Amino acid sequence: MSSRVNRAVRVFEGFHEYDARHLSKFAAGLVIPRLVYVVGRLVSVSYRSDKWQKGTFDYIHTIKSFPKVVVAFLGREGSERPRQLPQKIRDGNQVLVRIGRCLDAVYEDESGEVKLTFPADTDWFFSPSGRALYAIAAKRKLQCVIWGGDLNVEDRGIVG
């Protein structure tokens, strides 16, 4: 295994507190675009996970990070010009780690709080080195990408 895969396995096992059961690949057509439209500042992210093997639970992480953590929801143009994703976030050679089933994300824009919902087969993934979250449906289609501030995923969960 490559060093990137080994690191991702260690991060997965630290986060979930059980051995990685299997490795899987994303569909060949999965694209992380160079340019995205930021729709707002992240307020919270929710996911369902069996981390710690004490059953499956729903987790909500409220963002407290400064500077702001931003959300780019694909397929929805923001009021701003498109923004370039940092290279480390769009690197096609990344190995992403699954957090759990994507429930939702809440962001704030000039009109107030907006709740994003996703297709039922969407999972949250993160890049151990990129400090970004990705909502990916059926391992085929990027739904949104979240990055910025002190956002990170540690053994105890999402922080920032």
Image (cartoon, helix red, strand yellow):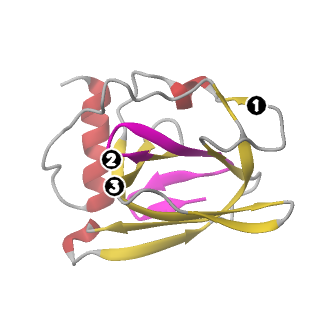
> 42 or 156: nearer the eye?
42
Disc sitting over residue 82 in the figure: 1
Please tell me whether residue 147 belongs to the stretch shown in magenta: yes
* C-alpha separation, residue under disc 2 versus residue under disc 3: 23 Å
For residue 59, side relative to residue 112 (left or right): left
Q: Judge depth for marks 2 and 3 and give the one in front.
A: 3
Question: Where, quadrant-wise, is the N terminus in this rendering?
Answer: top left
Q: Which residue is mark 3?
A: 121
**Which SS class for mark 3?**
loop
Say whether residue 136 is left or right of residue 76: left
**Residue indicated by mark 2:** 11
Kindly report the secondary structure that dominates the magenta region of the rendered protein: strand
Q: Residue type at mark 2: give it.
A: Val
> What crowding class fits label 2: few (fewer than 14 Cα within 10 Å), some (14-19), or many (20 or more)?
many
Q: Are marks 2 and 3 in contact (CB under 8 Å)?
A: no
On screen, 7 above or below 49? above
Q: Is residue 132 visible?
A: no
Q: Is residue 138 above or below residue 106?
A: above
* As drawn, 50 above or below 11: below
Q: x and y percent of residue 123 in the render? A: 37, 53
| The C terminus, quarter of image | bottom right
Measured in 3D between alpha carbons, the distance from the residue under mark 1 to the one under mark 3, in whole angstroms, is 27 Å
Q: Which mark is residue 140?
A: none
Identity of the residue drawn at 32% across and 24% down: 28
Residue stretch rendered in magenta on the structure: 136-160
